[in-house]
Image (spheres, rainbow, N blue to C red):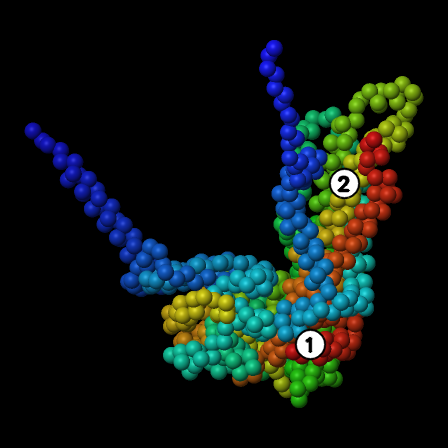
Amino acid sequence: MVIKDDAYYASRRQFLRTLAATGAIAAADLAWWEEPFLGPRRAHAAATTVRFQFSVPEPLRTSLVESLVERFNKSQKDIEVKVEFVPQAQARQKLITAVTAGNPPDCCQIWDNWLGEFDGMGAVEDLTGRAKEWKYYKDTLPIAWETVTFKGRILSFPWVVTNDAIYVRADRAKEYGIALPKDDWTWEDFLKTARAFTKADKNQYGFGMRGQGTWAVLYATEFMYGNGAQVLKDGKVAINSKEAVDGLDWYLDLFRKHKVTPPSVPTDGWRQIVEGFGRGVTNMYLHNSGSSEEQKKFVGAPSFVTVPIPLGPAKKRATFYFSETLTMFKASKNKDATWKFLTFLMDDDQHAHYAKTLGLLPARKSIADRPEFAKDPALAGFIKSFPFSIVSPYLAYAGWGGKLDSEGVPLFQQAMVGKLTAKECLDKFADVLTKNMM
Amino acid sequence: MANQQATIAVAAPRPLISRHTREILANYAYLLPAAICLGGTVLFPILKAMHMSLYHHVLIRPQDYRFIGLGNYVRMVQDPTFWLTLKNSFIWVFWSVSLQFFFGFLMALLLNGQFKGRAIFRTINLLPWIIPGVVVALIWEYIYQPNYGPLNDLLRRVGWMREPVAWLSDPGLAMPAVVLTNIWRGIPFFAIMILAGLQAIPDEIYEAATVDGAGVIQRFWSVTLPMLRPIIVVATATRIIWTFNYADLIFVMTSGGPANATQITSTYTLLQAYSDLDFGYAATLSVILLVIMLVFTALYLKLTKGVESVAG
């Protein structure tokens, strides 16, 4: 007689299940950046919760940040980070409302051009002391610290940095017999290339100019710098100088006179210029390195190159650095836990992974020097632009932040559509800046 | 003889509050929860906005927070962009609502007829109204896209266009383009309201009018329109108020550009609040919007003789 030992069968099934589950956990851990992570597991109820607001300009970032936060939470026993995803368009507004209501998150990811405003609201924690004692303080690019330093105080971690360069369709250049731009190309070369790239009958344009959003003003200003213009000179607003006016005239003529840009320019924001290039409507555009990974998927890595912005008649050029920051709020009740999370994000693996996934440049030198960044052809134009990259002059005053958008953009658009001359536009713009130097 | 004892009636002590007063107070007590809710959600924000409008309240300059009386109102009167946005608001409201009403009326008349598939057609008619405003804006932004949008593509294919037209980027075309989108979205609202009104008109009235010799047009002018008047007044008044305050569509499609060509007062208010962080000035603009709408509603109801007089 055979006696079925139920306990034995149940135990075997249980064993197999456990084995399968262990395998799945191991596989998941192995898949985690191709190396297992065997840190201490978090307790059921963490003693400290850190609220982290992250604004999402593209879906890729959601899974990226979720994985980083999960990795941090797994490594902690007493701290749990809860991430609050907010669409980029609402991020600033949501933070302002939260700060005003006295309930901001513990920390957030914001761009450096918002930092001055939040500092003006008295909402940002001064990180100077902690940052200077942080083990990677000296490993972080000085220019990166500069983007987050206000009135001598370090207000954030510069998570990743970037500057601007011109994206060029290499495959189309070959197809049309156009020479690829050299690193020291000039405005004349730029116009010539843009003209050669413009095939209106094929719905193709030489240059995807931006007309909407704060960076519409910044890109125009970068070109004006090529003509010797400056936003501030001897502490005074000088954006309406002759050099600036001539530079802006030349830049806007790309749309107004030479028609080497799509007709939609006055309302084209960053999404339109990136997609325009990706869809093959434009063959060049000026942007930061943040869209390089997207373009690798849109047009393919071999089909485009990045080159520095062209030299202007003054034999000068400049692109503006900006950083994506990790910022702690003064109202945080868990500052030590928050600091722990922020420094975790700046550690080697997390820092490199974040920057690489998004096509941005790490703020830490030792990471930026890795071949995956330094030798990536899609980033070449940005790295070559380092010598003439400067911190955006519009970061000088917190009062300028919102004004660029609310008054600067409409003024530049008016100049674009011929309602104002470049001189009138810049005179009015200089007035706006002068009135808000605070 | 029975011993009779006289009972002396003792007057009950006079209550502190009379019965009539108690009833009144009880009635008010029943209203109190609703009054608190309404006061907290409607009245308080309005009063708060009025209060804020009297202060210099720029979030990035908390040290400058101070009472400035009518300073923000003076600034508004001197602000040329405000007047431009007000003009744009009236253009936006006038064309949006009048054409929504016209086409909504036509649609309602069509849907009131007897034809096959009427139920499906009525449901389809509602679609633009059901879709959220932001999604509508994104769909139409794509339709208008000059480089790869379907509208330009269609016009080019039928040979009506050679050069691509930048519908939303040309200052002369941007406002008509966003108005057209708003018309598309608002037609179902009027259609459904007017259709409900049409179906409530008793057939006997039409029959009586026909017996009296009224033709189609006379029946329309003398029966349909007067009977629909209460609905038309309410629907247009609410739609005008909504459209005046409606910022989503423009905000997503053009952000008020190009060069303020589509900047209406409500988007300008949003810009002041969340771009410049100037809550004092933004509150001032909101208060003025409220006053304009109150004056308009009063005038509109007076001119259209109100709803009650017609209904009564």
Tell me the residue that label 1 is attached to. Answer: A436
- Where the C terminus of chain B falls, by quadrant? top right
The number of numbered discs placed on residues in the rendered structure image is: 2
Q: Which chain carries label 1?
A: A
**Apparent side of residue B96 relative to residue A324 in the rendered image (left or right):** right
Residue closer to the observer: B293 or A365? B293
Residue at the image point whose x is 52% and y is 77% from the top = A148
Residue at the image point whose x is 32% and y is 62% from the top = A77
Residue at the image point whose x is 76% and y is 67% from the top = B69
Q: Name the disc covering residue B235, or none.
A: 2
Q: Can residue A435 be seen in this view?
A: yes
- CA gap between label 2 and label 1 equals 45 Å
- Helix, strand, or loop for circle 2? helix
Q: Can residue A289 be seen in this view?
A: no
Crowding around mark 1 (Cα neighbors within 10 Å: few <14, some 14 to 19, many 20+) is some
**Apparent side of residue A133 relative to residue B286 in the rendered image (left or right):** left
- Helix, strand, or loop for circle 1? loop
Q: Which chain carries label 2?
A: B
Q: For the residue marked with disc 2, what is the amino acid?
A: Ala
In the displayed orientation, state which residue is furthest to the front.
B1
